[in-house]
Every structure is written in structure tokens, then in C-alpha cells.
Amino acid sequence: MTSILVINNYGQFAHLIHRAVRDLNVDSELVKNTLGVDELFRRDPDGLILSGGPTMDRIGNCKLYVKEIDLPILGICLGHQLIAETFGGTVSKGASGGYAHVVVEIIEPDDILVDMGPIINTWASHADEVNRLPKDFTLLARSEICEVEAMKHLNKPIYGVQWHPEVAQTESGNALLLNFVKICEER
């Protein structure tokens, strides 16, 4: 059975991500972001999901995971932002602020957003957002309020989305998570 670790960055939806993945008949565990890389490997995951959270000050070892773990990784909200920073992108305060409905335009469906576009309605926070794509990444989706709604590393199975696929307000949220599960299974 596929196993995905959900890394808890203290976001209010971390438990929802864990449940959404578990409800897809995937072995899922919600774990602290302070675990060492060796501790994560002992759990023998097929992939990692980096949850959202309130601040970059509480991301624990997540940047280390992104640099050192050669597994599929999906970053959601803060997870998306910390992936961008780890690879040289930048994050800044968003003009739109807190949680709201955001219409996302899928530019490149790739493997994580396949069969989801070209437009989806999402639920997202833009209090902080990626404002400069990292060098080794390609842009997958944008919106009128944020140019980097989704991205993918050019050579590694590392993905980031600004919106929350785990909440009911997001269209095709389960499809995105299923696409990530498939990526993990094929790796």
C-alpha cells in the first residue's frame, strides 16, 4: 500500500490533509516537522506532503527534507512557499490577505494537475505568496492575484500549490491528491 507522510507545519488544515489522503485508501501519517531525515526514512514513505502553517519560523526541518529526501514532495500553501525559498525563489506578503475563493488558471497541467483545468475554483490564503519562481521550476498555474499558484521542479518530483486541495471549497482537490498518489506509486 502507498504510504504518504503529511508533515505538520502547524496549519489549521494539516489534519484535513491527513484525513483527505487517508480517505483515498492511502496509508497516511501526520508527523512533526522536527523529525530527523533518518526518522522519516524509517517510516518508509513513498512521498511527503508539506502542510500549510502560520509562519516560516515554525517549519522545523522542512527545508532539509526538500533538499535531502529523494521522494515525491507536494507543498501546500506554506509548504509551497518553503519549497520556493529552498530553491532560490522569493516569498512576500500578498495583496489579497486571508482565506478566500480564488479562480486559478492552469497553464501547464503536467502530471500533478492533469484533467483539472483549464480553470478551477479554489480556497486559498494569500497572506504570503511566492512572488518569484525558483530557477529550476516551471510555472503550472496562476491567478489574477498571484502569478505563482502552482509550480513543479524541472527534474525532481517536487510540486507546490498555493491553494488547499484538502478542503471542500476547492474544485478537483481530490483529483490533485490522487494525481500526487499516482506520482508516488510510479516512482
Image (cartoon, rainbow, N blue to C red):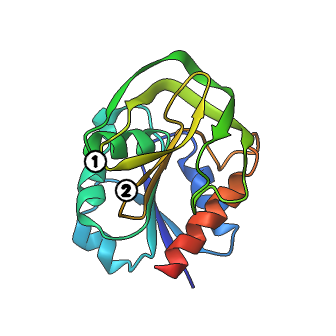
Q: Residues within 10 Å of mark 1 (few under 14, many from 20)?
A: some
Residue 9 visible in this rendered orientation of the protein: no
**CB under 8 Å between callouts 2 and 1?**
yes
Checking the image for residue 32, the label placed there is 2
Foreground residue among 52 and 121: 121
Mark 2 lies on a secondary structure that is: strand
Residue drawn 61% across the image and 74% down it = 26
Disc on the earlier residue, 2 or 1: 2
Mark 1 lies on a secondary structure that is: loop
Residue drawn 73% across the image and 58% down it = 115
Q: Quadrant of the N terminus?
A: bottom right
Q: What's the amino acid at mark 1?
A: Gly
User: On the image, which quarter does residue 24 sit in?
Assistant: bottom right
Q: What's the amino acid at mark 2?
A: Lys
x and y, in percent, of residue 182 in the image: 59, 73
The relative height of residue 97 versus residue 124 in the rendered view (above or below) is above
Foreground residue among 9 and 128: 128
Whether residue 113 sits left or right of residue 172 in the image: it is left
Checking the image for residue 60, the label placed there is 1
From this viewpoint, which residue is outermost toward the top?
A: 95
Residue drawn 51% across the image and 29% down it = 147
Residue drawn 58% across the image and 49% down it = 108
Whether residue 120 sits left or right of residue 89 in the image: it is right
Foreground residue among 72 and 166: 72
Residue at mark 2 to residue at mark 1: CA–CA distance: 8 Å
From this viewpoint, which residue is outermost toward the bottom?
A: 1
Whether residue 7 sits left or right of residue 121 in the image: it is left
Whether residue 77 sits left or right of residue 16 in the image: it is left
Q: Quadrant of the C terminus?
A: bottom left
